[in-house]
Amino acid sequence: MELFVVSLASLLAGFVDSIVGGGGLILVPALFVTFPNTHPATLFGTGKGASVWGTGFATWQFSRRVEMRWAALLPAAAAGFIAAFAGAWLVTVVSPDFLRRLLPGVLLAVLIYTVLRKELGRTHAPLFSGGKEACLAASIGAVIGFYDGFFGPGAGSFLVFLFVRVMGYDFLSASAAAKLINTATNTAALILFVAKGHIWWHFVLAMALANVAGSLLGTRLALKHGTGFVRAFFIVVVSALILKTGYDAFLR
């Protein structure tokens, strides 16, 4: 029964994650509810073992249909990998609890800005090129990668927002970029969890297959309906993240 529950959660998480990020909003609570007495690191490691496959397949799907600016995105993915590893190491030394009360406010600001700027991310018009684009993309990858390794909630959504707002991408292209960087950050965190033995391989296989199935469905919907659909989905997911992180920070 437990395998069915977490696999279903993994499928839904893969669907959400493939479009705008935020799959952890579904998968992580499901793991904690299903296995309340298990060490958190083991649950995080098992979740990463599933989600890395979903983001990887989403990246592949997007790359076939969306312009991927590899000269900028590969350095961003590399920076995200290194920074996520550093963040995951730091969380073993320093508690990230101070971020819990700050996060809902940051997400609320992102939501308000996106809703008020109705044309934000509707057209794909990269603002930079060459070395400057690569440096800015790598900076975004490093900052959000570190955050993903250290704390995590909403990392994919932050990536989408920053690639839209800072880099001038539309929401569809920003989502594709976010998937590549998320794959790198998930891989970095997974390596650390595996090295410390915090993973349940007997659950990972089924959860990974479910996550990939959800990811493929979400990616196809995003590609079919375009940037307007991704923008609307982004608003819904960020709103849900605000409610979830606000509850965790102030009511739990």
Image: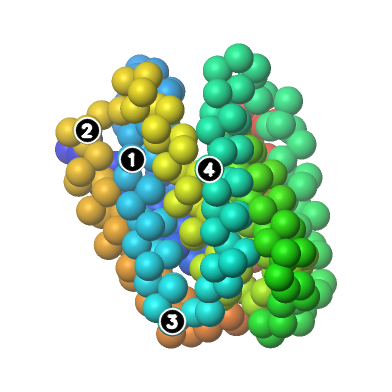
- Between disc 1 and disc 4, whose residue precedes? 1
Q: Are marks 3 and 1 in contact (CB under 8 Å)?
A: no
User: Which residue is label 3 attached to?
Assistant: 65
* Amino acid beneath label 4: Phe
User: Which residue is label 4 attached to?
Assistant: 81
Distance CA(mark 1)–CA(mark 4)? 15 Å
Residue drawn 55% across the image and 23% down it: 89
Q: Which of 244 and 93 is in front in this view?
A: 93
Distance CA(mark 3)–CA(mark 1)? 26 Å
Q: Which quadrant, please, contains the C terminus?
A: top right
Q: Which quadrant, please, contains the N terminus?
A: top left
- Between disc 3 and disc 2, whose residue precedes? 3
Please state which of the two labelled residues, at mark 1 or mark 4, is closer to the viewer. Answer: 4
- Between disc 1 and disc 2, whose residue precedes? 1
Q: Do the residues labelled 1 and 2 touch (CB within 8 Å)?
A: yes
Q: Are marks 4 and 2 in contact (CB under 8 Å)?
A: no
Q: How crowded is mark 2: few (under 14 residues within 10 Å), some or many (20 or more)?
A: some
Distance CA(mark 1)–CA(mark 2)? 8 Å
